[in-house]
Amino acid sequence: MKWIGKLIDSITERGREIWQQENPAGSSSIRSIDRDCAELLTRKGDAVAMAIARHILARYRQLNEHGKLDFFTYLLNLRPDYQALSIQFKSLETDESPQVYQQVMQDLNIGRRTLFELLNVPGEGTRALIDMRADLLPLLKQDPRLRMVDNDLQSILQSWFNRGFLEFHSIDWNTPAAILEKLIQYEAVHEISDWSDLKRRLADDRDCFAFFHPSLPGEPLIFVQVAYVDDISDSISPFLDHQLPVSDPTTARAAIFYSISNCQAGLKGISFGNFLIKQVVQHIQGVHPNIRWFSTLSPMPGLANAVRSGVLDEAQLVFLAGNQAKDIRQLASDQKLSTLLVTEYQNLDNDQPHVRDWLEAVGLHYLSQVKKMDGPYDPVARFHLSNGASIFRINPFANARNYGLKSSAGLMVNYLYDLDRVEMNHEQFKQTGAIDILKTARKQGRRLKGAAA
């Protein structure tokens, strides 16, 4: 691979020389980056095109936030000729020849999609475009029109990062240190405090698996952490205690997926997790035939926001508390259950059965009944339920750390991946939005009326 890289660098350098000979000011900072992009779109030769593309990427990296906004606004205007396309589409109604179809598809991709493809120069282009999208995403609120630019960029990245290109790897303590450092950096669910913490998470009774892509060597796209235990876990604490003795994984009966982290902000919306989990399950089945259950221990990161925004309102919380509402309200200074959940969660009492019952009912109602558009409000729930998982159990006080209390009053949930049900659950969820709730969770939510089946 090194000789290929040297060959590409050599070709690109020769292209840069030719470009400079053609136009001595062509690669200087006097010209605008927009003009460089316009020239790139008209070049025919590969060598000069790669030189211009690398020059554009280098100039983009030097832009400040305002300059990047101007660049994306330029891309917004770099679109196909809609009027010409309209005429061509009408011609397809009477002439479905391959030539006409090919011309339509070619003209449809003229503009920023073609530019993105040209900027994907070997060695740095893919990484640069992912970083470019990471810069773009926060700007969408500032100018919603830029969503058209994002749609094209996401579509391009989606095609490059499809399942056929992904590489599945197991990560252990012998993995190169540069990759292990990435795990510490990218862990998004339960922070890895130091190398000692990471080493415990990679011990014999744990596993870590990740997807990589050939264009990003040494850069995980997503990784999942797994613990092998005796039963389906109801608390995150043991998994975060790096002083806990290592157990024998050959006697374990459950594999718990306790952390799944996406690593590349620029690949947001491009899902790898569904493939990763299923591949991990297959791998574990081959290595640990003693494992009977595959379950997550997942957060409910949208719960507090749902309460604050009124999507999950006080009336629903009171209904779910039933006859115990008054007793629970006494724990909150202003007598509101919503306040208790989002700001006074420290007053919740783990020893009070009615409090646990209420939290279980709230958790199940939130996951199965509170919606955002045509799916669950909670992003983690949408992910696992769309993959075919079942809601197995709601776990009050499962995460007593500050971030767990702040986001969801300490609630966590087990999503069970029952291999005999996963595909059917997936199909039903996609077709009708149906959520598979197992008997264990249904008993917890006995106050819940009209739960999804």
Image (cartoon, grey):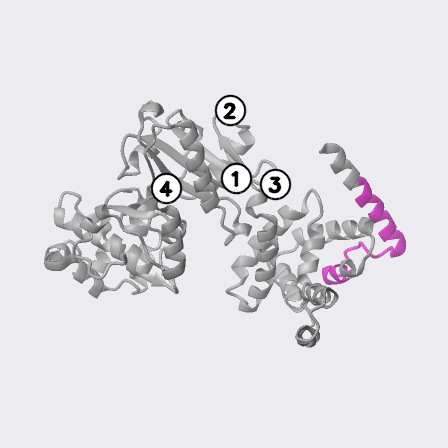
Element under label 1? strand
Disc nearer the start of the sequence (1/4): 1
Residue 261 quadrant? top left
Label 3 sits on residue:
216
422 in the magenta segment = no
Instruction: Determine whether, in the image, residue 22 is placed left or right of residue 108.
Output: right
* Res 419 label: 4
Q: Quick check: 434 above or below 390?
A: below
Label 1 sits on residue:
211
What is the spatial separation of the Cα atoms under label 2 and label 4, in whole angstroms?
31 Å
Q: Who's the residue at 37% across and 41% down the image?
A: 419
| Main SS, magenta residues | helix
What is the spatial separation of the Cα atoms under label 2 and label 3, in whole angstroms?
20 Å
For marks 1 and 4, give the one nearer the viewer: 4
Given the image, on which type of amino acid does mark 1 rest? Phe
Given the image, on which type of amino acid does mark 4 rest? Leu
Given the image, on which type of amino acid does mark 3 rest? Leu
Q: Give yes or no for contact between labels 1 and 4 (Cβ–Cβ under 8 Å).
A: no
Label 2 sits on residue:
174
Q: Is residue 336 visible?
A: no
Q: Nearer the viewer, residue 420 or 210?
A: 420
Segment tinted magenta in the rendering: 10-38
